[in-house]
Amino acid sequence: MPQPTDAVLSELHFNKLQAIIHDKTGITIADGRSTMLVSRLKGRLRELGLSDYKAYIAKVTSDPDEMQELINRVTTNKTYFYRTPRIWEHFRDDAVPQFLTKKAGRAMRVWSAAASTGEEAHTIGILLEQVRRSEPGFNYSVLGTDVSARVLKKAETGNYEGAAFAQFQKDAPDLFAEFMKCDDAGQVQISPEIRTRIKFKLHNLQKRLSGVSPFDVVFLRNVLIYFTNEDQENILRHVHALMPSDGVLYIGESETLSRLNTPFEIIGPMIYRPVAGARRTQA
Ligand SMILES: C[S@@+](CC[C@H](N)C(=O)[O-])C[C@H]1O[C@@H](n2cnc3c(N)ncnc32)[C@H](O)[C@@H]1O
């Protein structure tokens, strides 16, 4: 019997896993990326004591916890604080002041829609906490969602190590010093006033997020690249349905909506607003 680590992923089983992953996450694993898939899954086969992918697929499709584990392993979760500084400058200098002018009196609502381990949601929190301290009456809430349960568990701790914040510490030393408390082991903890305003929730972007009020600003960054054009359009219709017409949408540096049919118009590189009057999707 072959050792688990030597299990060969046949074309048939690669195609089955491709279909399962697409169905559960929308992520399209390109043909020819079977080596990548094997490198992400072989450790799991070993842990489960399974010697082939046929048995692994049977396990995944009959056990929801194992399906979640597959999702955790195939998602790419790279993220860090203050990623793409120009977006944060727009958020601080344009999006927030616009909100303050028009909507003073209610809390600003922001969605980090592919939150990973929470660095983006906490960067939002840090910038908004700074506003809250200087603007009487201002308040905010941040929702971070992701399809991977593993990264959300880490996000909920609000604890970070060096690589996640090194760039932030360089780019925005004052913010870092004000809101992140370093311990002797070199870990930082986000301040409690911020953490109480941030919630994390498991959510698959392919579906419409239900039971929430509209979001003034949505960060949908560095996730669209994993989807087909059709899946991106579907996701963007769901996002549009949860935004007021003066909302702001941010996407990632290597992403664009220009070749897609979406209800958003560009207002700057990586920055969009909902098209007024575009038809809203049903829940
Ligand atoms: C590369 S990270 C981006 C994190 C952060 N937005 C940033 O820009 O730094 C992409 C995240 O998208 C998540 N993701 C992938 N497919 C998803 C889906 N269908 N629904 C929700 N999140 C998804 C992954 O789990 C991963 O944590």
Image (cartoon, grey):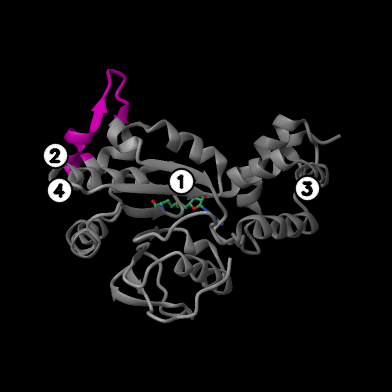
Task: Check disc 3 and report its element: helix, strand or loop.
Answer: helix
Which label belongs to residue 172?
none
Please report the bounds of the magenta region as a residue range. 169-190
Rendered image: mark on residue 116: 1
Q: Which label is found at residue 61?
A: 3
In the drawing, does residue 85 fall left or right of residue 245?
Answer: left
Position of residue 191 measured from the top left corner of the image (x, y, whole percent) = 28, 31
What is the crowding at mark 1: few (fewer than 14 residues within 10 Å), some, or many (at least 20)?
Answer: many
Check disc 1 and give the amino acid type: Ser
Tell me: residue 119, above or below residue 113: above
Q: Amino acid at mark 2?
A: Asp
Q: CA distance from mark 3 to mark 2?
A: 49 Å
Using residue 84 as the reference point, say whether residue 117 is left or right of it.
right
Which of the pair 39/269 is nearer the observer?
269
Mark 3 or mark 1: which comes first in sequence? 3
Give the structural element (helix, strand or loop) at label 2: helix
Q: Residue, x 22% and y 49% (percent of image)?
A: 138
Report, in whole angstroms, how far the alpha carbon at label 4 lies from the one at label 2: 19 Å
N-term-proximal mark, 2 vs 1: 1
